[in-house]
Image: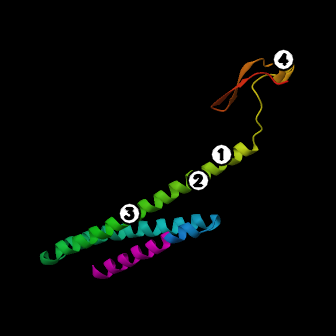
Amino acid sequence: MEPLYQQTHKQVHEIQSHMGRLETADKQSLHLVENEIQASIDQIFSHLERLEILSSKEPPNKRQNAKLRVDQLKYDVQHLQTALRNFQHRRYAREQQERQREELLSRTFTTNVSQARGGGLQALGSSSPLKLGSWSFIFVGGVR
């Protein structure tokens, strides 16, 4: 049990150091780093399943300590998994905001008033609304 525990413990620390690479990686290598970290986390979870079985086979005087050590590793790995998911969620949200920003910047906005009714804004009169997506604006007074 001890060699597998030491190997798994070492992998947990390696993943912790790789998590820092997520913040500094460029867009092309970011997915690769995420996939590497996720693959390592998955491998650790499989090691933990084996360690749980092995810890239950330890002699009674060592069993409780072995189970505590495995539980601590499991706790650490779950936090790493959560940290990775949080990072991915923030990245997805940031990418979506960038796409929406680009879409808004490339869109041309016009009024809802038909130009064919005669004169565009001059025909609006003294008060008319202008809807821009979910925003509404009220123009008071005509354009002269």
Residue at image position (22%, 70%) is 67
Tell me where the magenta segment starts and ends, as one range: 1-19
Rendered position, 81 above or below 98: below
- Say if the magenta span includes residue 100: no
Sequence-first disc among 1 and 3? 3
Q: Amino acid at mark 3?
A: His
Please state if 52 lies on the left or on the right of 63 as rendered. right
**Residue name at image x 28 percent, y 81 percent:** 2
Quarter of image, res 104: top right
Front in this rendered view, residue 55 or 65: 65
Magenta span: chief secondary structure: helix
Q: Which residue is mark 1?
A: 100
Q: Looking at the image, is mark 3 or mark 2 earlier in the sequence? A: 3
Exactly how many numbered labels are in the figure? 4
Estimate how packed mark 3 is, as few (under 14), some (14 to 19) or many (20 or more) residues with alpha carbons within 10 Å: few
Residue 102 locus on image (x, y percent):
70, 48
Disc nearer the start of the sequence (3/4): 3
Q: Residue at x 36, y 75 (%)?
A: 8
